[in-house]
Amino acid sequence: MSLFNAIILGIIQGLTEFLPVSSSGHLVIAEHLLPGWHEPGIVFEILLHLATLLAVLIFFRHDLLKLIRSLYSSGPESRRQRRFLIMLILATIPTGIIGIAGKKFFVSLFDRLDVVGGMLLVTALLLWLAESRKAEKMREKEFSSGKALLVGIVQGLAILPGISRSGSTIATAMLSGIEPKTAARFSFILSIPAISGAALLNLKEMQAIPGDQLVACAGGAVAALLTGLLALKLLIMILEERRLRIFAVYCAAIGSLTLLAALF
């Protein structure tokens, strides 16, 4: 793999991991429709996931510090942060169960263009419905246990190729009445154990990076980190301006074209 190809893959990973367009769906589409394209090795894939994980840690470093400080401090704000942390832990449970129990089934669907196309349409519908919900119905800044579990279940199902993890979890939270910024904060911090878990599950297949691939792997990881930070900033701005329909239209178009390609 050349440095150029590694950087391109890193950019794609960084953008699609956080923007609500499904990184897994785009990888499956690329594998089927781009001549000569093939998936990168497991080592490179893990590096890209770790780079996007680092992007979340950097972007939400102040929020994470607040959560950590709440464990040994008192006061109303600390109580609120501890509650937020408990909701994150609660949401992680169904994600982990679904991910571990359904791994083989989900992996078997990564060869199905029709599944990717259909799931992209589901993502588009969720984004459109969330954007259509009136602002006055999305004012809650705290998750209940039921809402946290629901978001966790949706994140687990987002392993399906074509379902955007960020898009589906943020949309679900918004549809349940959570304000967009809180929904985004919850979704992306919730991704930390999810991305970490996915990387750990693949560690057993990890091999030493060949000497001639060190520069390419490093370049791809840096590209994923920088574009991931950019994508996070961009999505927060889009949520504040209520423009999720841009991604809904994009996912609907790509999903429809993918279904046509699968059929014909």
Image (tube, rainbow, N blue to C red):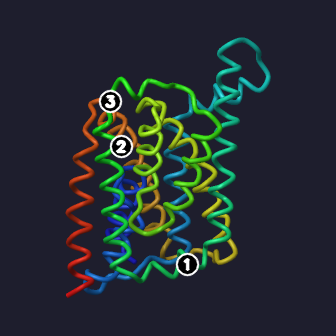
Left/right of residue 179 with respect to residue 53 in the rendered view: left
Q: CA distance from mark 2 to mark 1?
A: 30 Å
Question: Which label was assigned to residue 230?
Answer: 2
Total labels drawn: 3
Residue 45, given in percent of the width and then of the height, sits at 51, 69
| Residue nearest the observer in this picture, 202 or 206 | 202
Residue 255, given in percent of the width and then of the height, sits at 27, 67
| Residue nearest the observer in this picture, 110 or 49 | 110
> Within the image, what quadrant is residue 87 found in?
top right
Left/right of residue 193 with respect to residue 116 in the rendered view: right
Say which label, 2 or 3, has the lower sequence index.
2
Q: State the residue position of label 3.
A: 240
Question: Nearer the viewer's eye, disc 1 or disc 3?
Answer: 3
Q: State the residue position of label 1.
A: 210
Sort mark 1 into few (<14), some (14-19) or many (20+) by Cα contacts within 10 Å.
few
Sort mark 2 into few (<14), some (14-19) or many (20+) by Cα contacts within 10 Å.
some
> Within the image, what quadrant is residue 25 found in?
bottom left
Q: Quadrant of the C terminus?
A: bottom left
Say which label, 1 or 3, has the lower sequence index.
1
Q: CA distance from mark 2 to mark 3?
A: 16 Å
Q: Residue at x 48, y 31 (%)?
A: 182
| Residue nearest the observer in this picture, 13 or 86 | 86
Left/right of residue 195 with respect to residue 34 in the rendered view: right
Question: Which label was assigned to residue 179?
Answer: none
- The amino acid sitting under disc 1 is Pro
Q: Residue at x 20, y 63 (%)?
A: 253
Residue 70, given in percent of the width and then of the height, sits at 72, 23
Q: CA distance from mark 1 to mark 3?
A: 44 Å
